Amino acid sequence: QLQLVESGGGLVQPGGSLRLSCVASGVTFDYSAIGWFRQAPGKEREGVSCISPGTGKGYFADSVEGRFTISRDSAKKTVYLQMNSLKPEDTAVYYCAATVAPADWVSLRREAYEYWGQGTQVTVSS
C-alpha cells in the first residue's frame, strides 16, 4: 500500500521553472515505478514522465522531452519532476501515481498505475 502526496505547484511565467515533489508513504516505494500525469480542463489525463524502480530509468512524453527531468530519492521516498522552459500549454493539475513493477519498467499508460495522489495545480501564464 502506498499513499502519495504532491507539492510544488503554483503560478509561473512562460519560460520559468517549477519542481514538483511526490512523497510516498508505505513499504513498497523502492519497488514501485512512479509516474507523473497531468489533466487540463476539458482534456483527458495524459502521461508526462515516469521513472523505473530499480534502475531509475526515466521516460518522457514527446511534449516535455528535453524540458522536464525526473529523479527519485529512496531515503526520502520522494520523486521529483523538474520542469523547465514552461509553456502555457503545460497548465494542468499534475498527479503522481505508483505501481509495483520490475526494475527497468516504465509506462505512461494511466491504466498501469494503482495508486494516485490528489494532484497539484500548475499554471503557466504571464
Image (cartoon, rainbow, N blue to C red):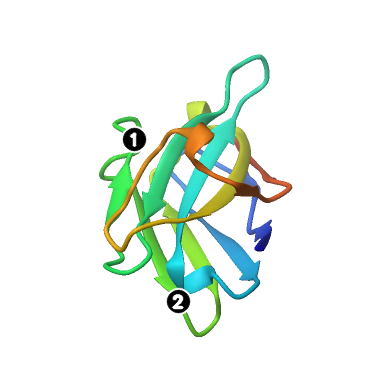
Compared across the picture, whether 60 is left or right of 119 comes to left
Q: Residue furthest top?
A: 42
* Above or below 76: residue 109: above
Q: Could you say whether the residue bearing mark 2 is in a helix, strand or loop?
A: strand
Residue closer to the observer: 80 or 107: 107
Q: Quadrant of residue 23?
A: bottom right
Asked if residue 126 can be seen in this view, the reply is no
* Above or below 116: residue 8: below
> How far from the left and from the top, in percent, is residue 99?
51, 53
Query: Which residue is disc 2 drawn over?
Result: 73
Q: For the residue marked with disc 2, what is the amino acid? A: Asp
Q: How many marks?
A: 2
> How far from the left and from the top, in percent, is residue 98?
54, 53
What residue appears at the point 55 percent right and 81 percent down from the top-left corner? 76
What residue appears at the point 59 percent right and 61 percent down from the top-left corner? 22
**Which circle marks residue 61 in the picture?**
1
Q: Could you say whether the residue bearing mark 1 is in a helix, strand or loop?
A: loop
What residue appears at the point 65 percent right and 48 percent down from the top-left corner? 116
